[in-house]
Image (cartoon, rainbow, N blue to C red):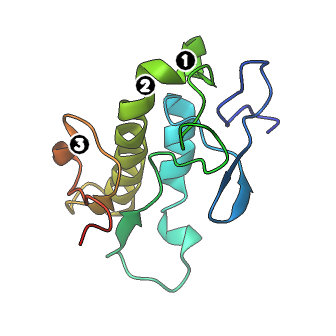
């Protein structure tokens, strides 16, 4: 939290919501520095002994918040540039998708097309990888 990598609540503190793992904070993927930091997490040095081929499944990147009235971040949660969540809710997953795809591009030296399956997406997401519509039966 010292680097300010998380979405903030309306009072400027790290937003804390409840999801599958319990109390959760959410990376502010609208910030290019954070997307770059996230992308670096997919480097070969982060996965010792792995091959260059890595495939990612971004799940629960809507973001889901189970303890709120709308099952997502509050509308007044603040993202990079003091943008309220109500303005970027649908785009949040796209930025997450883009950060993961950038990580795989870096990992492969730009030679491999990344495969990042994402549950959350927005117009243009198909440029960075396929989308999954959730657990529909």
Closer to the N terminus: mark 3 or mark 1? 1
Q: Which mark is residue 88?
A: 2
State the residue at coordinates (44%, 46%).
62
Label 2 residue SS:
helix
Q: Which mark is residue 75?
A: none
Which residue is disc 1 drawn over?
84
**Quadrant where the C terminus lies?**
bottom left
Separation of marks 3 and 1 at Cα, in angstroms: 21 Å
State the residue at coordinates (82%, 35%).
2
Q: Residue 81 in the image: x percent, y percent?
A: 56, 14
Number of numbered discs visible in the structure rendering: 3
User: Is 23 located above or below residue 85 in the figure?
Assistant: below
Which residue is disc 3 drawn over?
125
The answer to whether mark 1 and mark 2 are in CB contact below 8 A is yes
Separation of marks 1 and 2 at Cα, in angstroms: 7 Å
Quarter assignment of residue 95? top left
Closer to the N terminus: mark 3 or mark 2? 2
The answer to whether mark 3 and mark 2 are in CB contact below 8 A is no
Q: In the displayed structure, does residue 70 sit left or right of residue 16?
A: left
Return the residue nearer the eye: 16 or 117: 16
User: Is 99 located above or below residue 55 in the figure?
Assistant: above
**Quadrant where the N terminus lies?**
top right
């Amino acid at each position: 939290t010292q680097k300010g990598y998380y979405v903030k609540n309306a009072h400027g503190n790290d937003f804390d919501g409840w999801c599958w793992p319990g109390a959760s904070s959410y990376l502010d993927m609208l910030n290019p520095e954070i997307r770059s930091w996230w992308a670096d997490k997919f480097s070969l040095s982060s996965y010792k002994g792995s091959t260059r081929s890595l495939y990612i499944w971004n799940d629960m990147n809507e973001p889901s918040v189970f303890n709120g009235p709308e099952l997502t971040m509050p509308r007044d949660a603040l993202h990079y540039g003091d943008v309220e969540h109500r303005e970027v809710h649908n785009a949040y997953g796209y930025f997450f998708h883009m950060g993961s795809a950038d990580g795989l591009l870096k990992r492969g030296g730009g030679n491999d097309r990344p495969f990042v399956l994402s549950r959350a997406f927005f117009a243009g997401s198909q440029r960075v990888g396929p989308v999954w519509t959730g657990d529909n039966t």
